[in-house]
Image (spheres, helix red, strand yellow):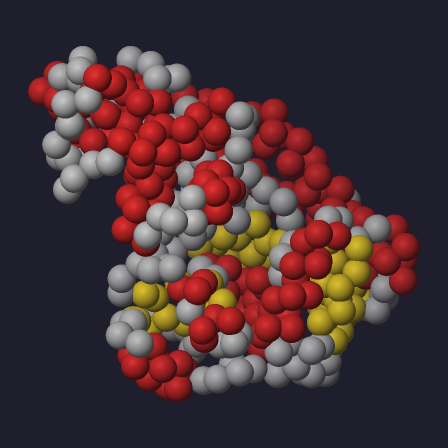
Amino acid sequence: MKLYKNLVNAVAETLQEIFLKGRYADKALERLFKQNAQWGSRDRRFIAEAVYDIVRNFRLYSELAQSQKNFWFITAVWLVIKDIEIPEWQEFQHVDADFIKKAKERLKNNLPVYESYPDWLWELGTKELGKEVWEKEALTMNRLANVVLRINTLKTNKQKFIEAFKAQNILVNEVEGMKNTVELVKRENIFQNPLFKEGWFEVQDTGSQKISEFVDPKPNELVIDACAGAGGKSLHLAALMNNKGKIISMDVEDWKLEELKKRAKRAGAFNIECMTADATSISKYESKADKVLLDVPCSGLGVIKRNPDAKWKLSPEVIEKTKALQQKILKEYCVMVKAGGSLIYSTCSILPSENKEQVNKFLDIDHGFEFIKDASIMPSEGYDGFYMCELKKKIN
């Protein structure tokens, strides 16, 4: 393939935004593409693939480049590893492809470097999951995630959806065990698809969809999605309830709820009411909800396939603060569950210390709940990693 200096420069500058200015990869790329609307899909694909792959393998590539700040040279390493011919540009005059490839081979037995994880995170994963399980999951999480779509049954059905996509020459595979879930055979920007704008589908991983199904909402129930964010699970809950009953979607960030309102309108989800999560709203629904979903903030280790820069933005201190927040949310929000109702705790983490151990810690202090069931999804199963647990509020 022919390389253009402006595109390679865009890769290097985006890496600088991510690693020196702390921006998230998706936001850095979104900003870049807005500033360069003239670029075609091929150019954008090259930049996005390069940036995400370098972020995913940053420790390895920076080790091979012998620098964590020379982003042009790090990009050159990526080109060598991908067997893309290095142009005779001044910026690449000291690139030795043979040296880079031999150095990569020598690092194969140093898994934290070769698989690009911080030492502390590799040690933590090994400690919590055991060496064999952690290594299996760590390697899996370095693979590119599939694009999974949830068909919105408030607007269409699976057969109509697949036929409509086929008419656009977009092929999908059905996901085993899921009624309204498909995977794209070939990656593409489906956010520009007219069917997306009409609300026929949402991009949502299978693991995330399984949490809404685990909640098992009924059409006549009051369900509170108390850490709703931009509302992916709220929208799924609305579809499962067939727009009946009521969903209260709460979050501490009002801008996320504004995004949810737009998404709900597009999806035709009319049984969702958005509300800022605070002491007043919690008190308003004390002992009233049939189901309360707490999809709490977490380390996000289960979704590293999609957010590889999380590896470099996390720290032991961040995880400890997050675990304290998880307990705080459990204790403060559980009061909204009515007697006999269910509290569903979920994370997109694979660490037991954020999952079952947090549930046990909550149950050790008598809040009036009992354990019913839980489930874990590991990245090695093919999708994102999640944990979910149902607790029942005792009837006194």
Towards the viewer: 250 or 176: 250
Relative horizontal placement of residue 76, taking residue 346 as reference (left or right)? left
Tell me what residue is drawn at x 61 percent, y 66 percent.
Answer: 263
Identify the image quadrant of the C terminus. bottom right
Tell me what residue is drawn at x 53 percent, y 83 percent.
Answer: 155
Give coordinates of residue 23: x percent, y percent.
53, 33
Kindly tell me whether residue 204 is visible in this rendering: yes
Give the answer, above or below, for where 69 lies relative to 242: above
Towards the viewer: 67 or 224: 67
Give coordinates of residue 131: x percent, y percent.
35, 32
Which residue of the protein is positioned furthest toward the front in this rendering?
38
Tell me what residue is drawn at x 52 percent, y 49 percent.
Answer: 348
Give the answer, above or below, for where 153 lies relative to 70: below
Relative horizontal placement of residue 194, taking residue 94 as reference (left or right)? right
Tell me what residue is drawn at x 45 percent, y 63 percent.
Answer: 191
Which residue of the protein is positioned furthest toward the left in this rendering?
98
Relative horizontal placement of residue 159, taking residue 353 as reference (left or right)? left
Identify the image quadrant of the N terminus. top left
Give coordinates of residue 255: x percent, y percent.
71, 52
Relative horizontal placement of residue 235, taking residue 12 as reference (left or right)? right
Give the answer, above or below, for where 57 lies relative to 242: above
Towards the viewer: 60 or 219: 60
Task: Please give the count of numbered marks on the rendered protein.
Answer: 0
Kindly tell me whether residue 122 is visible in this rendering: no
Give coordinates of residue 28: x percent, y percent.
48, 38
